[in-house]
Image (tube, rainbow, N blue to C red):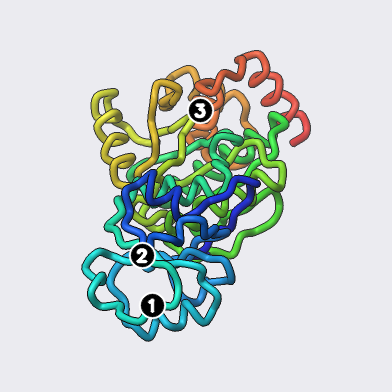
Amino acid sequence: MSAISETTSQRLTLGMLEDRYGFSLVPGFARDVTVTSLANDVESVTPGALFIPGGRIEKARVALAEQRGAYAMLLPTSMRNAIDDQQIPILFADPTPQQIGELAASIAGMPSESIAVFAVAGASNERLREDVDAIAQFLHMLGNPVGTLCKGDSQSLERFLDLTYPVDTFSVQRVLSVCVEDGVAAVIIALDDETLAAGSLESVGVDVIGYDGETRNTDVEQSLAQVCERYGCVLDDNTHVAVRTDETDMMAIQADLGTGPSRPLSLAIAMVLAAGIRKSSIRSALRVSRELN
């Protein structure tokens, strides 16, 4: 997916974009034009879209976007003199990844504000997939409807999502929006290059971020800072960092759920603890699951 549609009643006009981000609108009298979706490739353009190719493109592609029903385009400032026969309004700008993320999140209805976002990072992509699966299963065990964003295994509840990896900003916001619409309570995201494109998590607030590795706390902080800078995810005072501890390792070993190594379960326990779930609730869920198995 390389398009995101409006999911709220909020109107998004070209004038709002001009005022908010300082984009240059041509013609100026098109301020009241309303766009209902964003698209970053011509094939994803639908009637009402704001076409954002993200760089210089051929005039033939511009014409095709117009034919497919784009209401407006956001083109780089270097193309200002290259378009001499425009048929629809054009915003000329060189937006930052953060601005594109804000724009995508806005038209999607700010979905990350309506869902708990868990993210997991580490040195091994294979281990990350084990971690995502363990966290999803454990949150489900605790009664939470879950979604996942991980290469080859992205889901909203039981529905698999057909995505092109690595996913971009528009795709991430679309996935979060779909999860919110489906009633998902928490989504787990794998922070790796196979799953995510650089800057794809701009304007996505992360509630809990887990790190799967054998490093000291200072190294964990540095590693997470680098990961978050690459993908653009938002870490603030409300974000909790989780790592495995001797206690979570012991809880995972004692659980003996028979689902594989205890390491992914240990990290899952650490992350739900960081999210504020009480130990008594976790132990109870582990006990019930063990009895069922």
Is 257 located above or below residue 60 in the figure? above
- At a point 32% along the width and 35% down the height, the residue shown is 224
Is 65 located above or below residue 90 in the figure? below
- At a point 54% along the width and 41% down the height, the residue shown is 110
Who comes first in sequence, dot 3 or dot 2? 2
- At a point 38% along the width and 65% down the height, the residue shown is 27
Residue 6 in the image: x percent, y percent? 60, 54
Most foreground residue, 210 or 91: 91
Circle 1 is placed at which residue position?
86
Residue 140 in the image: x percent, y percent? 68, 36
Residue lying at the far right of the rendered structure: 292
Circle 2 is placed at which residue position?
26
Disc 2 marks a residue whose amino acid type is Val
Q: Nearer the viewer, mark 1 or mark 3?
A: 1
Who comes first in sequence, dot 1 or dot 3? 1
CB atoms of marks 1 and 2 within 8 Å: yes
Residue 275 in the image: x percent, y percent? 54, 23
Most foreground residue, 291 or 14: 14
Is 89 located above or below residue 108 in the figure? below
Q: CA distance from mark 1 to mark 3?
A: 52 Å
Q: Residues within 10 Å of mark 3 (few under 14, many from 20)?
A: many
Q: CA distance from mark 1 to mark 2?
A: 9 Å
Tell whether 55 sits left or right of 71.
left
Tell whether 97 sits left or right of 244.
left
Circle 3 is placed at which residue position?
271
Residue 269 in the image: x percent, y percent? 54, 26
Q: CA distance from mark 3 to mark 2?
A: 49 Å
Q: Residues within 10 Å of mark 1 (few under 14, many from 20)?
A: few
Q: Nearer the viewer, mark 3 or mark 2?
A: 2
Q: Secondary structure at mark 1?
A: loop
CB atoms of marks 3 and 2 within 8 Å: no
